[in-house]
Structure formats: structure tokens, C-alpha cells
Image: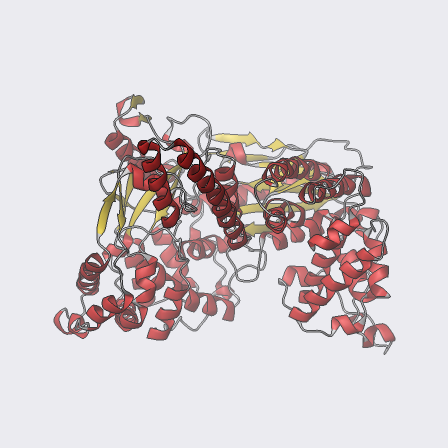
Amino acid sequence: MKAKTRVKKSKTRDFSRFSSDRLNADLSNVDWSALFANESNDVNSIFSSFYNKFNKLENKHAPMKTISNRKAKQFSKPWITKGLRKSIRVKNELYVSGDRAKYKMYRNKICTLTRISKQQYYTKFFNDNLTNMKKTWEGINSILTRKSNNYKPIRSIQDPDDNNSISSNPNRIANILNKHFASVGPKLANKLPSVQRNYFDFLNRSNSPDTSFAFNLVTPSEVKLEIARIPNNKSHGLYSCPTQILKCSSNVISNTLAEILNLSISTGVYPNKLKMAKIIPIFKTDDDTDPSNYRPISLLSNFNRIFEKLIFKRMESFIAQHNMLSPSQYGFRKTLSTQHAILDIVSTIQTNMDKRLFSCGVFIDLKKAFDTVDHKILLHKLDHYGFRGVINKWFSSYLQGRTQTTQIDSYISARNDITCGVPQGSVLGPLLLLIYINDIQECSEKLKFFLFADDTNILYADKNLRSLELIVNQELCKLYDWLTANKLTLNIKKSNFVIFSPAQRKFTYRPKIMIFDNEQNKNVALECKDFIKYLGILIDSHLTWKHHIDHIAIKISRSIGLISKLRHFVPKHTLINIYRSLVAPYLTYGLIVWGQACKSYLDKLLKLQKRALRFIYFSDRNQHAIPLFSDAGILPLQCSYYELTANLMFDIRHRNAPRNIRDLFQDISNIHPYNTRSSASHNFYTQSSRLSIQLNSFSRIGTKIWNEMPLTLRNLSKHDFKRKIKRVLFNILSSEDSYLDIRNVIQKVKFS
């Protein structure tokens, strides 16, 4: 859905006379092979010639046009169809004619048709964007005529080159922000002290493969597939073309694009035009005149996206084949998620509690990690991990010579060179960051690392708090050496720690955790917190989950308030879809971890679930809600907890879960050699638990769920397993008069 335009005039492509057949006919008449015959092996010239020829035909078949404010307003109300606009013109003519009776009748009819059209539009809109929360919020804000918080016009900015004086000139604002974004990485690197150890001292020689990465030539069919996968609403930067045109012309241009990429790799040169980024600054918070309070959103060419995707797939396969990345790194990796990272750290803390150990969790934040990656170090690490020879030369070309401009409304800044960092809006950027920080755990043999890209948590456990303090502080000095050697900067203000222990165990001593701060040039104490927000989950020092449940209860209450307003505009099935977009994600995200909270906390969320359903069905507040759950196809909280845990247990049994999560479980056949019914059924071993916090942990509840599950369920395929589990849970729900806790759900499924 297009947002309301904020300028008097804007430019867009005119597709009113566009024909994909005519475009492809013209593209087919171009002798693309001549590009390679005339330009030798100069990748830059070849790509420039390709783009110029393609862009010329693109402008011929879908020329740029300037649209007026009136037209832009029409686009902001897509439910006003051509037929309605024609009727509105007739209505206006009736008003001018003075025929009041006929005018009123016609006006009322148009109002009715507009209301129906608007309802149909939003019904389709919410159904199409069921899993897209951003789009869902756009639709809600549009219905309720609320302004979006995402857009904040930049009217003035501080100029660091002029004693932080305020500049209101739009062109100057664009240049100030662009210079700030381009220089933030080098400025942080220049503040670092001289290194005590070199970065290559931390690289694990055993993790360097003997075989080097070999690039398999790209085929035209691969290019076509990647073009087809580009989202239609994907924004793009300089030297791009509309996704619609790219997709309809893919049959003609795929051969040429494949040849260009293959030549790029073989010569070790990346096209300069694809290294230019357009930056859109987005305001974060606090002072809106401070350049550091804006987040740069990089828009790159969609041709660049195609090339990077094809390189990424080959790199990802090579990295997985040689098992290079740390098993504790969950960021930007296929089949791994934030929930796996949270489950890993919480399971470790619970095990430590059961062993009577205190756990110190240090949550560190890196300043501008993407922007401070040193190119020389990165290229050396790529070589270490097997990306040697011409592919290393290609990455050198890919990283160096990058430029960016910043756009404020219609004003575009001058270009600035990028001398360090990896492009954050790219496909390869996140993977290159993972490679860059992969050896962070080599700095300490005692600390345990949990990583999600640059979000880093460190854990150490000890029976004695003074001993814990001493060792953690010693090991953090080694971590600081690693950060300095790799030219990364710690954000002291956003780094803190938590001491995890059972609620019954009282502290006899408060540890003081220290780390060196570059800006103050001394060791500073990190702040000790009672709870911490890690990857969207509030983890408290006793793992009660009270803070997190209170937090999401507030979020859900707001969403339910919106549902109560929206129910008068959209039909029931659309409201259910809105529930799935605005309420369900808060309830299911991390539920495998915090679903083990006590019943009184979980009941708070169950009440909110029931309230939402009663609003959707216009039901009385005292009406029994179980029939509403069944009719809406929504599971109560504890049933959802069972469903999510059972699905993950299925992955664990079939070895499709992360290694650290699989290691939480042991097969009974590995515990003893006897041929018992449990070992023959491939059950997991039920480990002993001293504390209730461990008894209710994922490893214990998951074991019970799997072992008590009928074999007829366990032996299904993943697709059939998920469907059957959901069906069984709804059958149990419809036969009950009250809501079951997790242990009762386990028993009901066992005998289902």
C-alpha cells in the first residue's frame, strides 16, 4: 500500500502503455554478445554498456513522468477505482448543475460503493500481508488515519564542521549526514589504542581448510530464478530498474547477466556502478538535530542483489561443508534463529543453577560493527577460511572503491568514499561480518560465547562470587585485546551484566565487572542489571519471566485495543488475520523458553487472548471462550507451548536442529545397552533435576513431550506431523470445559 506523498510533485514510471512482449522484442533485437567481443575483459565497460542499452529500452517502454499532487492523492487511496473516479466527476457535475435531489441521491450511492470498495481493499490487503507486521501496521494506521512514526522530515541538522551550528538548508543537510555516515567507521578505528596482539594470533589454524573455494560458473537458469525471487515491493538504489521490468525481461537478459558475473569472478573485478549506495536516513530517537541519531538505510542496485545472491549461495555451501562457523553463532544462518540462541543460553543458565553455580552473563554491544570492519583484516580472514586466489582478489575489488550518497526528499548529497565496513543493506555484508567475528571465542578458553551476528553474550559460572568476579575480569581483558586487534569498539553505555541464580539463593557479595574504555582511557565498571533484553526477550536474574510477560502483556493490550476499533470496519476473518499479525507473534516468540513460567503469570496472557477473541466475535465478556478458540483456529497459550516444543523436538530427533540444542538431549540407547521398550522406541533419556527451574526447563519438558507422544505421531513426515499435532490439540480443546496446563496437555495427547 502506497503511503501519502509528501511532496507537491514526484516522478514515477508510466506503465499505462507498457507491453512486456514489445519490450522483450526490442531486447531480443540487441546483439548482447557484441558487449564481450568489443570490450575485451573490461567488466566495468561491459556492465556500463549493458546497463545503458537496457536502460534506454526501459525508458522507451516505461518512461519517467511527473505526477501532480492530485494524482499522488489518488494513489494514496487505491480503493478509489477508475469507475468510482468517473462517478465522482459525474457527481461534481450534478452539484454544479444545481439539481440537489439527484446530486444527493448520486452522492449517497457513491459513498456506499466507496465504503464497500474500501472494505474489500483492506480485506485483501490484510490477507496478502498476513505475515508482514510492517504492512499490517501500515494498513491499521491508514484505516485509523494515524500518522506513521517511521517518517520524520529532517528540517535541520547540526553541522560538525561549523561548531555544531544548526543548518536548515536541505542540500547541506544531505551532505552533513552523508559525511557522518561515511566517516563514523574510520573515526572509531582512529580512537583505538595500539594493539597488544595481532588479529592473526587469534585465528585457529585447525579451522583453516586445506582446499580452497572453487567458484562454479553461474548459469542463466540460476539468474532467472534469483530474478523471480526478488520481492515486487523491494526498494532499489542507483543503476537499477523496476522489479516488474526486470522479471518480465529475465528470459532475454539472463544469459548476459550470467556472463558478466562469470567474467567478474574470473578477472577479480566487481563493476564500480554496483558499488554505489543510496542512503535514506531514518530517525531513531532523542535529539533530531544530532546526525548520530539517524540510522542509514542503504539501497543498492537490484542487479547487485542478483550477483550477490549467487555468490552467497556458493560461499554458504563451502562454509557449511567445512563446518567453519562457530556452533554458537546463530545470526544470518540457514535454519537457525534468534529463538535457538535464546534457548541455548537459558538452558545453560538453568543447568548451572541446578549445579548450585552462579552464572555471570555479560551482554556486550559493539559500536557500528558493520561500519568498522577493516578491509585488510577481512581479506586475510577470507584467505584463512579458504577464499584464496582470484576470489580473494574479487572480494578486494568488491570492498574497495565503494561510494555512497544520501537523499533528503529530492536533494541528493555529493558522493563520499567508504574506506572501511561492509555494506549493511547487501546480501554478502552479514555473511562477511560473521566471518570477521568468527574467531572471537578464541580469545578465551573459560568464557562461553553466544552470538547472533554482532549481538554477543558471554557466560561464565562459578560457585564462588569472588572467584567468578576475578576470572571474568581477567578474561574480559583478553576479549578487549581481541576487539582492539580487530579494530572493533565496545559500546560501554550499552554493555552490562546479570548474575543469574535461583531466587532462594541470596548474594553474600556483589561482583564488580570491569572492562577498559577507550574514550575514558581506563577500566570502567559495567552496570549490573536485574534483567536484560536479549534478542527481544527480557531475561531476569532468577528466570521467573515476570518482566517479559508484563512487557508483552502491555504490547498485546494495545493491539487488542486496535482490534476493538477495527472490528467495525473489517469482517471477522480479517480480524482473525490481524490477531495473527499483531497478537500471536508476541505470544509465540520465545514461548519455548518463557512458556515454563508459573501459572499465575501465564494466566495473565490467557485472559488477554480471551479478551481479543470476544472483541472479534462481539461476545459478552462472561461468555465461555473455548468455543471461540476452536472457531477461530487459535490455540490457547499452553497448547501453543506444546505445539512449538513438539515441533522442535521433531527437528532434534531428526537432527535438523542446531548442534548445541541437540546436545541438550541423550538417547536412552547411549545410556545403557539393554534392549528396553524405551530404547526400541528411540526415547530420550530423562535427566535428573534438583530444582524445579530445571524440572520445567525445555530439556526436561521436551523429553517428556516426546517420550509420551504416540509412535503413530512420531513416525510421520514433518509436514504431516505439524498438521496432526495441531489437529490433536484442537480435538482436545473442544472436548474440555477448562484450560489445561502443559502436563495435562501431555497426558491428553498421550491417550489421543
Q: Residue at x 48, y 47 (%)?
A: 117
258 or 618: nearer the viewer:
618
Task: Residue 567 in the image: state x and y as whole percent.
Answer: 61, 41
Q: Is residue 509 visible?
A: yes
Horizontally, is 136 left or right of 560 in the view?
left
Q: Residue at x 81, y 45 (%)?
A: 624
Task: Residue 325 in the image: state x and y as whole percent.
Answer: 52, 61
Task: Residue 694 in the image: state x and y as whole percent.
Answer: 79, 50
Q: Residue at x 35, y 42 (%)?
A: 74
Horizontally, is 258 left or right of 322 in the view?
left
Horizontally, is 38 left or right of 62 in the view?
left
Q: Quadrant of residue 471?
A: top right
Instruction: Give the number of marks.
Output: 0
Residue farthest toward the bottom in the current orientation of the protein: 675
Task: Residue 656 in the image: state x and y as whole percent.
Answer: 63, 67
Q: Quadrant of residue 24?
A: bottom left
Colouring scheme, one of rainbow, by chain, secondary structure, one colour: secondary structure
Q: Residue at x 63, y 55 (%)?
A: 340
Q: Quadrant of the C terminus?
A: bottom right
Q: Is residue 654 visible?
A: no
Figure check: 161 above or below 179:
above
Q: Quadrant of residue 302?
A: bottom left
Figure check: 749 above or below 489:
below
